[in-house]
Structures are given as structure tokens and as C-alpha cells.
Amino acid sequence: MIKDYEVEKTLRKAYDVCIIGAGPAGITLALRLAEAGWRVVLLEGGGHEYSPRSQAFYRCTSTGLELYAEETRLRYLGGTSNHWAGRCRPFTVSDFANAPPVDLPGWPIPYGEIERYLPAAMDIVDLPQGAEFRTVNAGLGGDEFDADRFLLSPPTRFAQKYAKALDETAGLDVFINCNCVDLDFDEAAGQLKAAVVSDYARNRQRVVASTFILATGAIENARQLLNSTTLVGAGVIKKDGLTGCCLMEHLNVDMGTFILKDGQGTEPRQYYTTDTFVSEYRAGKGNVSTTVLTDVQTYGRTAEVKHFLENLACEMGLASKIDFVAKFSCPGDGVISTMIEQFPNAHSRISLLDEKDELGVSKVNVNWALSATDRHTIKCIGSELAKQFAEMGLGFVKLNDYVYDTDLALKVQPHAHHMGTTRMAASPEFGVVDSDCKVFGTDNLYVAGSSIFATGGASNPTMPLLQFALRLADHLDARLKAARGERV
Ligand SMILES: Cc1cc2nc3c(=O)[nH]c(=O)nc-3n(C[C@H](O)[C@H](O)[C@H](O)COP(=O)(O)OP(=O)(O)OC[C@H]3O[C@@H](n4cnc5c(N)ncnc54)[C@H](O)[C@@H]3O)c2cc1C
């Protein structure tokens, strides 16, 4: 049943599973585990709808590249699925088999571990059973770029689609406006004893369970761990350790423009780097979208022009606006956008600030940073694309100079895909959670969501994070049964 914690604080004395955060990961886990017969509580910080008061808890500072960390997350029931676009692309075998060319390992498990959960994850986001991830165009012709393969979810809004199930599933308590403000770890037992929750009047209460899952999104998962004085005091979470490090995004680089040769169709195309490209260049993966602007449209980048014109009369700062318009691509130009893999690097990280939020939780600074290997990936994808366009007789690509001159500042945008801040590894030397998604050094604290990604490939994260959530639900079901003495 869904209850408002501001009105009703009727927690059970103890739960089998306590899940913090009701986005796609938390909702999926809560329903699976409650349907399996466990007593589950799902704690959601926001309400049924967006509210500035809840969203304010996502405010943070930034010292690196601009991640728009507040704008690219939503803090209410359903989480960021209230905004997501629904693009789904599964990981592949090579995402898990290839170690990244950096000083951190890749995945400690093979792709087969989550592949079997693909049909169920597709069902959760309303993709037809058995549907093939399809291409919208042919590949580029050489060995380096295939056509990209993806499917579009409607997109599924988790709070709406699963409202009835969240309200009616037996054994499941859902509390909205219920903010987790601390994690209470018992060092001697090696166990988390309670999640501490608060209402807006700062009344705190302990939620007791035998198993806990953090599912608050990649930035908050790390923040909650770093904020826990008992986890830090016990040395389980080290402030200068890997928790919060390796923040990865998918890179949307403004690569440049192109002109198509006569006779080439002007429909948008999407390409994806092959495994041959990755091994040949020792570079990351990437999606490249090429679009010819045939008309001034009222969405995407052209919406910014419309917005500019609408606001010209009432806003100042004309110099930057004129610069923006001067550089804007006109109808007829081809524009190239990308979704490129970022490799894990420890300098790209979130860390705690001294300043606290309204409920006494330390705020975070986001330092989103790229490394030389990322610039190498961008350069290889750009130059290989330009080469292929010429060789295949498609047209002419003009790359922006920062694509091949890696000393110049890069023009890059994030994709709202936050990953890697509690990365999975075979040992605590290289990660925060083990191959079962359990926090190293604890016996009963798990993490769900894309913060566990060891590498992010160039696949949209939501469907894979659902595959991991389904795998975790199976693991916990078996573990809880074993603890109860049942045969599994
Ligand atoms: C504009 C946009 C478009 C996107 N498009 C795509 C796409 O096409 N394909 C794709 O794969 N992904 C896309 N994404 C990313 C996608 O939305 C996320 O991958 C997904 O929502 C992550 O799910 P999650 O459950 O891990 O986290 P979230 O959805 O962020 O949910 C976390 C939940 O935790 C709650 N919470 C946070 N802190 C606390 C606390 N202290 N106590 C209690 N509760 C708390 C939040 O309120 C929230 O409900 C997009 C994102 C944006 C912004």
C-alpha cells in the first residue's frame, strides 16, 4: 500500500527487505520481492508529483564539466523514468569480455549473467516479447561502423504503470515523502541495522530489515554511502576510496557538420562502432547519429533558436546570443551527434561537501572529468566516420578542430546517464560492490541502478539496470530462503 509518511508513520517492526528509492530499479525490486512473498518496504523521498522542495535535495555544486546533475534527475515516485525517452539498447558480450584500456578492470561477470533477464526487462518497459532490436538504416559499409540497433519504449512511466501494483501487492509497504538520511551500520556484526528516515519536520525513525538495497540513482547511491558515519567509521566506506569515483556518462560530442553528395537520401541515420573498431583502435564504443536539417523545426536544437527569438526582447547578454546564432547550423547542413562510451577514471567523481541539506545530509560536489583515453575514443570515432563518408561516396564531413586536436577544449554534453559511482568488481581494491551487487565489507547492504556499472559501453542504461535488478531479486530471494532454512 502507498502511504504518505508526512501523514502516516506506520512502519512494521521489521522487514525482510528495505529498498531506498522508487525509480525503475527500486520499483522493479520491490514488486519482484514482494510477489515472492517477502515483507518489503519501499522508501521514496519525493511525493506522487514533482515538488521543488523534494527536488532541492538534488542540488549540488560542480567543479568539472557541466553534468546538469540537478536537471537530469527527478526526485519523486517513479524517479527519472518520469522524464526518460525510452531508448533501449542491450549490452553485448564484448561489453563484459573486454577490459577497458585503463588501470581499472572491466566487469567481473560475463554478459550471460544478465542476458537471461533481457526478455523480462523488455516486458517491464513495454517492449514486445521477442522483438528484435532493429536498425533504421544500413551500416556504413566498412568494418568499423554497423547500423545501430535499438527499440523505443513508449516510454514507460514507472509510477503510473505500476501504481496499482505498488498499492495492492500483499506484503509491500510504500512510503512517499520518506527521506533516507542515514545508514546505521553495526561494525561487529558486519551488518546494516537500520535505514534512518526523516519527515520534513526532521523527526527521525529507524527502518529495520534483514536486507537493504540502495536504489537512489548513481549520484545519490554514492552520497548515501559516503554520508553514513557508521559505514565510514568502520572503514567499510573510505572517503578517499572508490565510492563516488568513476562517474561515467555517455558523451554527446558536437563532432562537426557534413554535406551529402547528390542522390544520397536525407533520412537520419544511426551507426554503431563494431568490435573490430574497438580492438583496432583500443578505443571505446560509440553511437553516431547523422541528421540533415531540412527545415527549421520547433524541437531539439532549433527550439533553442525559437526560444532565443521569443526572449530576445526581454533578456540581455546579447553578445553570447549572437555568437550562438552565428554558429547555429542552418537547414541543409548535416549535423553529427554522438553517444560515446566514457571509460572509468578515478578523477571523475562525486564527493561530500561540508554544507548540509534541509534534513542534515551532506551535499555533494560533482567533478565530471574525461581522460586522455576518452579524447582518443572521440578522435578515432570522428576521423573514422569522416574517412568512411569519403570512401563510401556518401559526402564530406567537416570535423570540429577539437575532435582531432586533443589539446583544445572539447564541446561535449551529457546524456543524463549517470553510471559507475559504486562500481562492481571482483575485489574491494577495484570496486564498491561485489558481483552480487553487495557492498564490500557488509553482509546485507546491496546497490541497484547504473552506479554499479563497471563500464558503461554506449548502450542506454535503463534496460540493463533492470536486468541487474531482476538478477538481484533472484539472488536475494534465494538468500532469504536459505536463511529461513528452505531448500533453494
Ligand atoms: C531527459 C532524460 C532522458 C532519458 N532518456 C533515457 C533513455 O532514452 N534511455 C535510457 O536508458 N535512459 C534514459 N534516461 C536515464 C534514465 O532515466 C535512468 O537511467 C533511470 O531513471 C535510472 O533509474 P534508477 O531507478 O536507478 O534511478 P532514478 O530513476 O533516478 O530513481 C531514484 C529514486 O530514488 C529517490 N531518492 C533519491 N534520494 C532519496 C532518499 N534520500 N530517500 C528516499 N528516496 C530517494 C528519487 O526520488 C527517485 O525516485 C534519461 C534521463 C533523462 C533525464
Image (tube, rainbow, N blue to C red):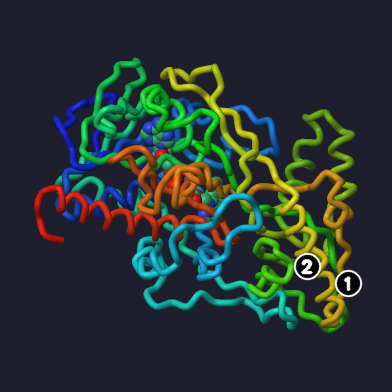
Q: Is residue 4 above or below residue 259?
A: above
**Callout 1: helix, strand or loop?**
strand
Compared across the picture, whether 9 is left or right of 422 comes to left
Say the numbered circle drawn on residue 396: 1
Q: Is residue 395 above or below residue 448?
A: below
- From the image, tell me which residue sits under label 2: 292
Q: Looking at the rendering, which quadrant does residue 41 occupy? A: top left
Q: Decide: few, some or many residues near mark 1? Use Cα within 10 Å; few <14, some 14-19, many ≥20.
A: some
**Residue 285: percent from the left, percent from the top?**
65, 64
For the residue pair 464 and 228, the one nearer the viewer reads as 228
**Residue 485: percent from the left, percent from the top?**
9, 52
**Residue 3: percent from the left, percent from the top?**
24, 34
Q: Decide: few, some or many residues near mark 2? Use Cα within 10 Å; few <14, some 14-19, many ≥20.
A: many
Mark 1 or mark 2, whichever is nearer to me: 1
**Which residue does the image show at 76% across and 62% down from the upper left?**
336
**Which residue does the image show at 67% across and 68% down from the upper left?**
278
Q: Looking at the rendering, which quadrant does residue 347 occupy? A: top right
For the residue pair 200 and 265, the one nearer the viewer reads as 200
**Which residue does the image show at 52% across and 24% down from the upper left?**
363
Q: Is residue 164 visible?
A: no
Compared across the picture, whether 385 is left or right of 427 comes to right
